Image (tube, rainbow, N blue to C red):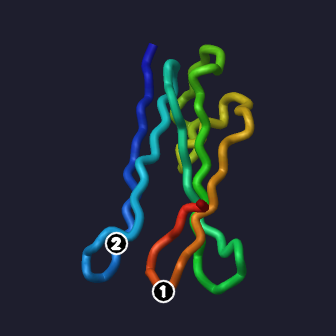
């Protein structure tokens, strides 16, 4: 039994080197795994700036399963099982602050 643990850290930095946004993206291909997450960009409010959409899923309640490496998508979202609806948070880009804002 092999477990495939894939993790990446996403870091968006400004030209001066300061951090604008960071997220750890993780997925384990074998239970127990607690949370899987992914992020993608889309201009949600059509203001010409890319907004960030975070999705996460608490996976501790899933039945035992195992994915092959090819069944974990490039964004670390498993495709070998049907997953419940993830929690989705949209971070809107604020050009005046040059950062993404979480909803309040």
Residue 4, by quadrant, is top left
Residue 19, by quadrant, is bottom left
Q: How crowded is mark 2: few (under 14 residues within 10 Å), some or many (20 or more)?
A: few
Q: Looking at this rendering, what residue extends furthest in the front direction?
A: 104
Figure quadrant of the C terminus = bottom right
Pick whichever, 31 or 71, lies toward us: 31
Residue at position x 73%, y 33% in the image: 84
Figure quadrant of the N terminus = top left
Pick whichever, 1 or 19, lies toward us: 19
- First in sequence: mark 1 vs mark 2: 2
Q: Where is residue 40 in the image (x, y as percent from the top left)?
A: 59, 61
70 in relation to 51, above or below:
above
Residue at position x 41%, y 64% in the image: 21
Q: Where is residue 52 in the image (x, y as percent from the top left)?
A: 57, 65
Q: SS at mark 1? A: loop
82 in relation to 22, above or below:
above
Q: Position of residue 72 (x, y in %)?
A: 57, 38
Q: How crowded is mark 1: few (under 14 residues within 10 Å), some or many (20 or more)?
A: few
Q: Alpha carbon of mark 1 to alpha carbon of mark 2: how far?
A: 16 Å
Q: Name the residue beneath numbered marker 2.
A: 13
Residue at position x 63%, y 86% in the image: 48
Q: Position of residue 78 (x, y in %)?
A: 61, 36
Residue 96's mark?
A: 1
Residue 79, by quadrant, is top right
Residue at position x 53%, y 68% in the image: 101
Task: Look at discs 1 and 2 and give the one toward the viewer.
Answer: 1
């Amino acid at each position: 039994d092999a477990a495939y643990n894939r993790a990446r850290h996403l870091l968006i930095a400004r030209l001066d080197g300061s951090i604008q946004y960071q997220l750890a993206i993780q997925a384990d291909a074998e239970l127990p795994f607690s949370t899987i997450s992914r992020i993608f960009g889309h201009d949600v409010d059509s203001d010409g700036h890319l907004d960030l959409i975070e999705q996460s899923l608490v996976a501790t309640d899933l039945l035992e399963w195992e994915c092959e490496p090819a069944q974990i998508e490039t964004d670390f979202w498993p495709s070998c099982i049907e997953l419940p609806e993830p929690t989705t948070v949209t971070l809107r880009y604020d050009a005046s602050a040059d950062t993404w804002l979480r909803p309040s």
